[in-house]
Amino acid sequence: MRVTSQPPEPSPNPALHDPWTGGTAPGSMPAQAPPGAPPTRPGGVVTLALVVCTSVLLAVAWFLSGVFGSGTVLWLGALAMVPLALCLLGLRWVDRWDPEPRSLLALGLLWGAGASVAGSLLVGDVFMELFFDPAGRLEMDLFGAVVQAPIVEELAKGAGVLLIFWINRAHFDGPIDGIVYGGIVGAGFAFTENILYFGSSYADPGTPGELATVFVLRGLFSPFAHVMFTAWTGFALGLCAERGRRGRWPLYLLMGLVPAMIGHFLWNGGVGIFFTDFLSFYFLLQVPLFMAAVIAVVLLQRAERKLTQRRLADYRDAGWFTDAEVAMFATPAGRRRARQWAAGIGRSRHMKQFTTTAMNLAAVRQRIVAGHGSGTDLARETALLHQSHRQRAQLLIGPKPGSAGR
């Protein structure tokens, strides 16, 4: 693995000039990193949101304990961890190229498991009172499944995705990011909803084996259902960010909520309305939809890698990165070699940080090139370039004691 130890020397001239667009930007770098360098810890707004969402989740847990008993909720929660683990593994695969901050992923999970469930429970009854017609064609249970649940639950989950969209401009900047945040909110919601379904089945002694059936259907056959629904909302908001149209977020939010609600409606009402048995519904509709979603994510990942390579090439042309470093950051093979090289000298953590900085630079540069960058982006680009300079130096100071160099 070859990386340069001689990046361009920063200019003492504090004037910022963008060498790519001719505008104001960090073409000539100040000698010291400017104030406002990229934070390494969650900001105050994120911390506050985490505290509030944790409190709401504890309130939901207290409510469930009152319904089923605290001991029952604990072991049902352990059972619900199985589909949750599958969802988290799937989302980790989606997010592997440019991982999102853990604090924001935790916020999405907490919102889904707590706030969105609480909102659905509170608003659901009001929705039924306002819109359910006892004399209508739909019975109450069917109305709740195919009308109330898709609308109320997707709105509640979508509010969490929108919250992250608002407070996370630096990281929520594309469709893949939106899919990850929407998916993590959906995974959290499914976790708590599974406890409710498992608890209701367990509390019904008249149907032996009901809990096992529900676990197989919800936990093993369809763990990604809510992930896929809410991923639509995140995907749409990701497009909104990518196109620099954040001021039009209501339109993009609606564009995401509609397919999310339709998917939810199809899942809840597919058997009985469109199909006569579950297996036909599952293999003829749900499995093809899931496969299409996976293919779409793979195509989006490829596009993201190509975009990363183009944006990092801008920094290469300006002398901030070498060809080897661009390949190291922008290709799967390059990253594998970089990890192996860094592990050989005991600096895996430093390589991970260096890669994260490069990915953040690519995202910032894309916003600037696309014409919707802000002064904050320009300052962030300056800080990130300084940070990459320091991280490269840390990588090249030699092997750590006790590590075998390669």
Image (cartoon, rainbow, N blue to C red):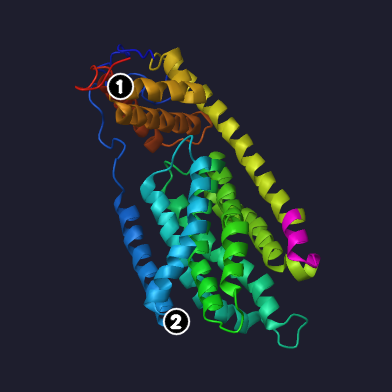
Q: Is residue 271 visible?
A: yes
Find the magenta span and give its range: 274-283
- Where on the picture, by quarter, is residue 201? bottom right
Q: Main secondary structure of the magenta part?
A: helix
Is residue 31 shown left or right of residue 205?
Answer: left
Q: Could you tell me residue 319's position as x and y percent?
A: 39, 13
Q: Is residue 392 above or below residue 250?
A: above
Q: Name the residue type under label 2.
A: Val
Where is mark 1, residue-wise? Answer: 389
Residue drawn at x 42%, y 18% is 325
Q: Considering depth in this image, is 352 or 178 the residue closer to the camera?
A: 352
In the structure shown, which secondary structural element does the residue marked by tag 2 occupy?
Answer: helix
Which circle's residue, 2 or 1, is located before the other in the chain?
A: 2
Where is mark 2, residue-wise? Answer: 67
Q: Residue furthest left?
A: 401
Q: Is residue 257 above or below residue 11?
A: below
Residue drawn at x 74%, y 61% is 279
Q: Could you tell me residue 47's position as x and y percent?
A: 31, 55
Q: Name the residue type under label 1.
A: His
Q: Residue furthest bottom?
A: 135
